[in-house]
Image (cartoon, rainbow, N blue to C red):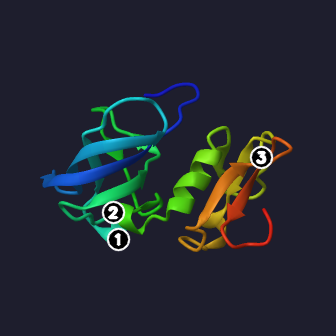
Amino acid sequence: MLTGFFVFPVIKAKVVEITAAGEFDINYDIEQTKILKGPIRYYDTISTAASSAACGLTLTKGVEYFITADKLEPDGSLYVSSCNYVVPWKNSHDILVERYRMGCDCKITRCLAVPCRASGTNECLWTDLLTGNLGNDEQCACIKKSDGSCAWYQEGASKLY
């Protein structure tokens, strides 16, 4: 069990093998090629639910992905679900990657119930689970503004929000 503050990784990785992990999960053996955020370590496996009904993801062998994770398994593998941002690397926009790097000092906190408030100015609240807008803000990034606070930014939008 993890205790204290832990920054979950954002990585670039290629799927090299797909195996069943028991009755309900799938393991994707990966070749990690880059770590964009999080602890400096090598991850070689991503696990997910076998069914999309259980929020599982389907990844393709040989494809390189931009992967965000928010759960570390006891065996050291990353667990991802449909709530994580996982897209083929070739589809991830360079601007998104650059904007994401600008948010390295910012923290994204999931808001699971109302009321929820940011604990500080270095935080962006993620409310997609409350509003049902899952996937609508894929082009957004939590970035640090010139005044030192953090806010959501969308490329092409006229303002931070």
Residue 7: x and y in percent read 53, 35
110 to the left or right of 53: right
Q: Which residue is mark 3?
A: 118
Q: Which residue is mark 2?
A: 56
Asked whether disc 1 touches disc 2, contact meaning CB atoms under 8 Å apart, the reply is yes
* Mark toward the viewer: 1 or 3: 3
Q: Amino acid at mark 1?
A: Ala
Q: Is residue 142 above or below residue 138?
A: above
Q: CA distance from mark 2 to mark 3?
A: 29 Å
Q: Quadrant of residue 65?
A: bottom left
Q: Residues within 10 Å of mark 3 (few under 14, many from 20)?
A: some
Query: SS at mark 2?
Result: loop
Q: CA distance from mark 1 to mark 2?
A: 7 Å
Can the viewer see residue 99?
Answer: yes
Between 20 and 16, the one lying in front of the other is 16
Q: Quadrant of the C terminus?
A: bottom right
